[in-house]
Amino acid sequence: MAISSVSAPSIDSIGAHAMSLAAPLQALEQRLGHVFARPDLLVQALTHRSFSSDHYERLEFLGDSVLSLAVSDLLYAQLQALPEGDLSRVRANLVRQETLHKLALDLGLAPLLRLGDGEMRSGGSKRPSILADALEAIIGAVYLDAGFVVAQTLVRKLFAAVDVNPQMAAIGKDPKTQLQEWLQARKMALPQYRVVGTMGAAHQQSFDVACEIAELRLEERGIGASRRAAEQSAAAAMLQTIEEKVPHVR
């Protein structure tokens, strides 16, 4: 009678993986705590649009949502006395560019980024927006490679050294947070952000983002050196418009 067993990875498959990734990327996998079944996802997550058309922006889009859910779950468990509004403010501070930039530096992402010559010469490997975006792309890549539980484990590992506390809710609110809270206080749907276009060379790119509040039939635009910066600019413009045009909504 044959006895079935779970087969271990073969030496050939392990060797193939080792040959498919350079040593620095294998070291990154060790820091992440995840060995990719699809190493190409990790490479893509480190690739800026100035280097290749197969860049990280779609993975970043995915990783942004995975990060938000994983951090929300973390805060729900750790800060059980905080109401929804304060939890939202703490989350906003944890997922903002400054925090993600520091985590990316701690992971050693800067020398691993794949950048075009112009972006490299202009200091792209040190740019906070690029490093923050690449970190989100890696989270998205892990999610695609192994599912949400593994991606959530990575997020918890990344934030393990961050002092998550209720006082973070009192840190100054950015325009996106202010706009979200204004709408939530009036039982309105959250704004929708979309990239309308990009301008400039790959190493000096600007993003044009629209912020729409369908219920108020309002739309404003913002320009920024990164998608995040453009969203903040659009949110700030929307807050100004609301102040000027919607005074009756209290």
Image (cartoon, helix red, strand yellow):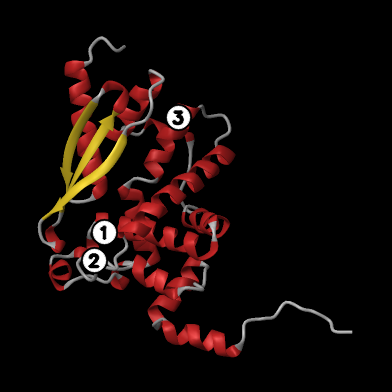
Judging depth in this view, the residue of 58 and 206 nearest the camera is 58
Q: Residue at x 47, y 52 (%)?
A: 159
Which residue bears the numbered disc 2? 125
The label number, if any, that marks residue 130 in the structure image: 1
| Percent of width and height locating residue 126 | 23, 63
Dividing the picture into quadrants, the one containing residue 177 is top left
* Secondary structure state at the residue bearing disc 3: helix
**Pointers 1 and 2 in contact (CB under 8 A)?**
yes
165 shown above or below 65:
above
Mark 2 or mark 3: which comes first in sequence?
A: 3
Mark 1 or mark 3: which comes first in sequence?
A: 3
In the displayed structure image, the side of residue 163 where residue 194 appears, left or right: left
Q: Residue at x 44, y 75 (%)?
A: 39
Amino acid tagged 3 = Asp
Which residue bears the numbered disc 3? 86
In the displayed structure image, the side of residue 124 where residue 148 appears, left or right: right
In the displayed structure image, the side of residue 228 where residue 108 appears, left or right: right
Q: Residue at x 31, y 49 (%)?
A: 98
139 shown above or below 193:
below
Amino acid tagged 2 = Ser
Q: Residue furthest top?
A: 248
Callout 3 crowding tier (Cα within 10 Å): few <14, some 14–19, many ≥20: some
* Secondary structure state at the residue bearing disc 2: helix
Separation of disc 2 and disc 3 at Cα? 34 Å
* Residue 119 visible, this orientation: yes
